[in-house]
Amino acid sequence: MSRAFLLVLLSTAWTASALAGTTPSLFDVHSHYTTADAERFSPEQIVAILDREGIERMLIIGEPAQRALELRELAPDRFIPLLGLYTSYRDKADWALDPTLPERLRTALAGGGYAGIGELHLFRPMRKSPVFREVVGMAREHRMPLLIHGDPAVVDQAFEWAPELTVLWAHLGTDPRPVAVRRMLERHPQRLYVDTSVRDERFLDEHGVLKAEWRDLFIDHADRLMIGIDTFSTSRWEEIDKVTARIRGWLAQLPPEVAAKLAHGNARRLFPAAAP
């Protein structure tokens, strides 16, 4: 079968699926809502975007953290706030050196409303930061997932301190190759989950066909991978239709039961209180 003919079949199948109303809803496990976003899109407009794009739920990180709670207050059945560490983009570089951060996080957690902690950016040289260790301890104490944007050494360190921790590893890690992701999933077979955010274009060849090595990874570890949209900038919100279309494009090339797990099933299982 030629690639061109395969693409026609995929396109036809996907169009038929959409017309039949079987396009899978998406449970996004990685997105942001900042003050800059709020100046462009009100909470009501964000809800309308989710409705339009078929996004059933969204794990949302506020910058500052309270932004996520604003969305949850409007639509508690749609938004699952994660407690963000940053008040602005600049905090990404040095949060692990801030001795006042843990107490601020404890105060925020005491106020309720959060289902996890992160996204936190950290890399190997700072993996033994005492501040990071306290954040890991808080996630363990509150039985909350920790969303980590970091390299394998940081994930390994978190599990060394707290083997029972649940980690959401952002962006398929810092070495987004199937072999590297597979290695980490096999090293931590119980509590590590991985989101696909901002990596979608890597999955497809020049003809738009899902590469075999990614297809194999998604099938072999269908219970551990989840889609992420990652509205990391206001422009990402403005072009979210392109992002969701790309995600659905590669999901459509997986077995339906696998696509459903990645699209929403695993996230519903991990966040059962938010499931329909």
Image: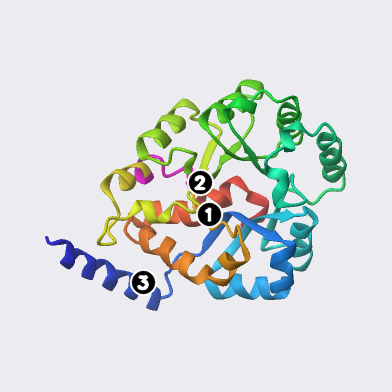
Q: Relative to 261, does residue 6 appear above or below in the rendering? A: below
The residue located at (50%, 52%) in the rendering is 197
**Residue placed most toward the observer, 160 or 89:** 89
Q: CA distance from mark 3 to mark 1?
A: 22 Å
The residue located at (77%, 51%) in the rendering is 87
**Is residue 117 visible in this depiction of the protein?**
no
Instruction: Name the residue that disc number 2 marks.
Output: 171
The reply to whether callout 2 and callout 1 are in contact (CB within 8 Å) is yes
Q: Is residue 25 left or right of residue 120?
A: left
- Amino acid under disc 1: Gly
* Mark nearer the N terminus (3 vs 2): 3
Check disc 2 and report its element: helix, strand or loop. Answer: helix
For marks 3 and 2, give the one nearer the viewer.
2
Q: CA distance from mark 2 to mark 1?
A: 8 Å
Q: Relative to 84, does residue 153 appear above or below in the rendering? A: above
Instruction: Report the magenta residues as a range.
Output: 218-225
